[in-house]
């Protein structure tokens, strides 16, 4: 099996790239793909860039050129649910494009020609990633100690709905509008639902796992940058390590 790994920022992906053995570096469409072995698993990993279009074109190339068998999208998100804190982990259950609105031609959030307002991740895929995150939170005591020193002492994991759009949610007004329109959504980012649409088109399994970097409020731009620079890469690599260990048992 070839596992595709995507992230929207270099800070989320650089430690993954560094950990890949026997690297083959391939440049396509202004992207650099790193193909090799990560913890004994064949992978191809890429920094997709921000936003729905960039991530969708990257996912399409992962599927058509590299023939990946499944894709994991990893990285950070802004917390929408008041129950989430910085450092918590969300595994996507359903993914919405919150800026899709073709009314009155069709329902708000409906993806044209699909009849769908969201893309759902199969429960089995969620369960495997949930176990990986649980193992990470339980076993990586060194990283947990580092987090505790930054006042992230009890990070938790939830599964929930994620909203994606070409908007950085950075004010209480934007956040409250999202809650009103999509009350089941627990966090927001800019790529996952677009990648989900591509994976749905091609029948490729997808898992989206996000770490909360900010509260999607007026301080989001400061909090998110600080968190990404300090912790995003370690979260991504540590969770992937546990996930790949589980893949070996399947």
Image (cartoon, rainbow, N blue to C red):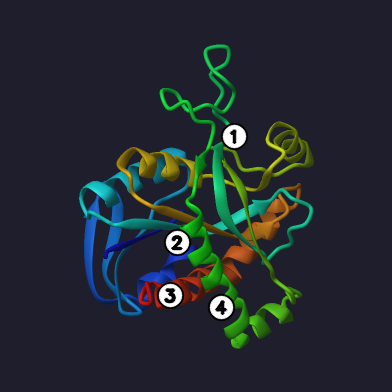
Specify whether residue 181 is in view: yes
Image mark for residue 98 = 1
Camera-side residue of 154 and 146: 154
Give the alpha-carbon distance from disc 2 to disc 3, as whole Å.
Answer: 26 Å
Identify whether 135 is placed above or below 68.
Answer: below
Q: Which residue is drawn at 56% across and 52% down?
A: 92
Q: Does the CB distance between marks 3 and 4 fall below 8 Å? A: yes
What residue is pinned by disc 4?
135
Camera-side residue of 9 and 66: 66
Q: Which of marks 1 and 3 is nearer the N terminus?
A: 1
Looking at the picture, how far across and down is residue 156, in whole percent? 69, 68
What residue is pinned by disc 3?
246
Q: Which residue is drawn at 76% across and 75% down?
A: 151
Q: Does the CB distance between marks 1 and 4 fall below 8 Å? A: no
Which quarter of the image is occupied by the C terminus? bottom left
Secondary element under disc 4, as helix, strand or loop, is helix
Q: Earlier in the sequence, mark 2 or mark 3?
A: 2
Comparing labels 2 and 3, the label whose residue is closer to the camera:
3
């Amino acid at each position: 099996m070839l596992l595709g790994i995507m992230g929207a920022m270099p800070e989320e992906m650089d430690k993954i790239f560094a950990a890949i053995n026997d690297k083959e570096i391939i440049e396509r469409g202004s992207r650099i793909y790193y193909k090799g072995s990560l913890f004994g698993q064949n992978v191809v990993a890429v920094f997709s860039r921000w936003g729905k279009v960039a991530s969708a074109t990257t996912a399409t190339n992962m599927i058509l050129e590299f023939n990946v068998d499944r894709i994991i999208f990893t990285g950070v998100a802004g917390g929408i649910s008041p129950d989430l804190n910085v450092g918590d982990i969300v595994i996507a259950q359903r993914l919405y494009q919150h800026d899709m609105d073709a009314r009155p031609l069709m329902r708000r959030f409906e993806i044209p020609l699909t009849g769908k307002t969201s893309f759902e991740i199969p429960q089995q895929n969620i369960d495997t990633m949930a176990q990986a995150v649980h193992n990470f939170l339980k076993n990586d005591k060194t990283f947990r100690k580092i987090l505790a020193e930054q006042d992230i002492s009890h990070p938790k994991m939830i599964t929930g709905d994620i909203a994606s759009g070409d908007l950085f949610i950075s004010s209480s007004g934007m956040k409250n509008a999202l809650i009103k329109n999509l009350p089941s959504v627990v966090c927001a980012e800019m790529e996952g639902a677009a990648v989900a649409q591509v994976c749905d088109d091609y029948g490729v399994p997808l898992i989206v796992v996000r770490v909360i970097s900010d509260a999607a409020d007026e301080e989001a731009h400061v909090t998110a940058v600080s968190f990404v620079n300090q912790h995003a890469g370690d979260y991504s690599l540590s969770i992937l390590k546990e996930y790949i260990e589980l893949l070996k048992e399947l």
